[in-house]
Image (cartoon, grey):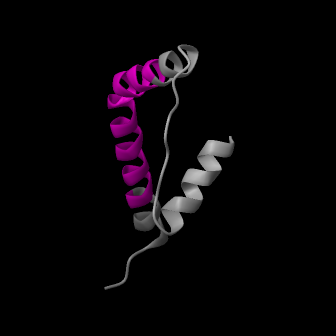
């Protein structure tokens, strides 16, 4: 099967379009989560972040930000 560069380009754009549409659809949930995190920190609470392996490194990175 020989796929042309234009076919690859078109398929790639379609995938990106789908990602953007999905990301836009979760916007309200992301904004709600940000509100909860902000409220927790503002009221003196703390947010615990954990992970295992590579996710532990991600958690450390997020916590340090």
Q: Residue furthest front?
A: 44
What span is colored magenta in the figure? 11-36
Question: How many numbered badges does the structure rendering display?
Answer: 0
> Split into 4 quadrants, where in the image is the C terminus?
top right
Closer to the camera, 30 or 36? 36
> Split into 4 quadrants, where in the image is the N terminus?
bottom left
The quadrant where residue 2 appears: bottom left
The quadrant where residue 26 appears: top left
Q: Residue at x 48, y 25 (%)?
A: 37
Residue 37's place in the image compared with 52, above or below, is above
Q: Residue at x 45, y 65 (%)?
A: 52
Please give left or right for residue 46 compared with residue 16 in the image: right
Residue 41's place in the image compared with 4, above or below, is above
Residue 44's place in the image compared with 8, above or below, is above
- Magenta span: predominant SS is helix
Q: Residue at x 38, y 59 (%)?
A: 11
Closer to the camera, 23 or 12? 23
Closer to the camera, 1 or 48? 48
| Image position, residue 38 (x, y; %) | 53, 19
| Image position, residue 7 (x, y; %) | 40, 65
Closer to the camera, 50 or 14? 50
Task: Report if residue 53 lies within the magenta region.
Answer: no
Q: Residue at x 39, y 26 (%)?
A: 27
Q: Residue furthest bottom?
A: 1
Please give left or right for residue 46 compared with residue 26 in the image: right
């Amino acid at each position: 099967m020989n796929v042309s560069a234009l076919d690859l380009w078109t398929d790639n754009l379609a995938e990106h379009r789908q990602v953007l549409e999905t990301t836009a659809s979760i916007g309200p949930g992301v904004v709600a989560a940000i509100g909860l995190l902000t409220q927790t920190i503002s009221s003196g609470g703390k947010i615990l972040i954990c992970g295992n392996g590579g996710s532990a490194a991600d958690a450390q990175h997020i916590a340090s930000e």
